[in-house]
Image (spheres, rainbow, N blue to C red):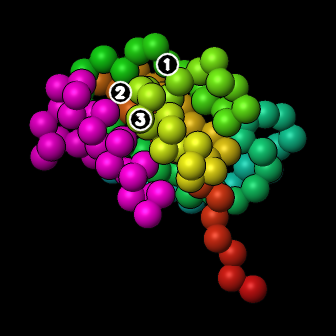
Amino acid sequence: MALVRVMGEMIAAALVRGAELGDVVLRASNVTVDHHEGPPPRGEYVALTILGAGSWTPEVSWLPDNANVVLVNPDLDAAVRVLGTPWAYTRSTNEGGSVTVFLRAQTTD
């Protein structure tokens, strides 16, 4: 349920910025981080990104242990904290922007 809430908050963030629902883009990517320097920690992740029109400033790099940075808005920030997201960030471009949330990949052994 926590992932559904995060996705809903991400989509809502795009809509509030002026994107039409049909123009909101969802991207899912497998990401391997093998460096030791910060965010996110080393590991296997699935990165979920929502892209949409409008202003996505200020750009932020969000970590769960930094209460001074809010990821987009209080609702999305609270949702990613409940989900246990290790890192998230926003980007602003000439066409709009995005929010990306990293989730730890599940392994099957």
CB within 8 Å, label 1 to label 2: yes
**Which residue is situated farthest in the bottom direction here?**
109
Q: Which mark is residue 75?
A: 3
Q: CA distance from mark 2 to mark 3?
A: 18 Å
| Amino acid, disc 3 | Asp
Picture coordinates of residue 10 (x, y %)?
36, 41
Residue to which mark 1 is pinned: 59
Q: Of the residues under marks 1 and 2, which one precedes in the sequence?
A: 1
Segment colored magenta: 1-25
CB within 8 Å, label 3 to label 1: no
Q: Nearer the viewer, residue 40 or 79?
A: 79
CB within 8 Å, label 2 to label 3: no
Relative to 77, 27 lies left or right: left
Count residues near mark 3 (Cα–Cα under 10 Å), then give few for <14, some for 14-19, many for 20+: some
Residue to which mark 2 is pinned: 97
Q: CA distance from mark 3 to mark 1?
A: 17 Å
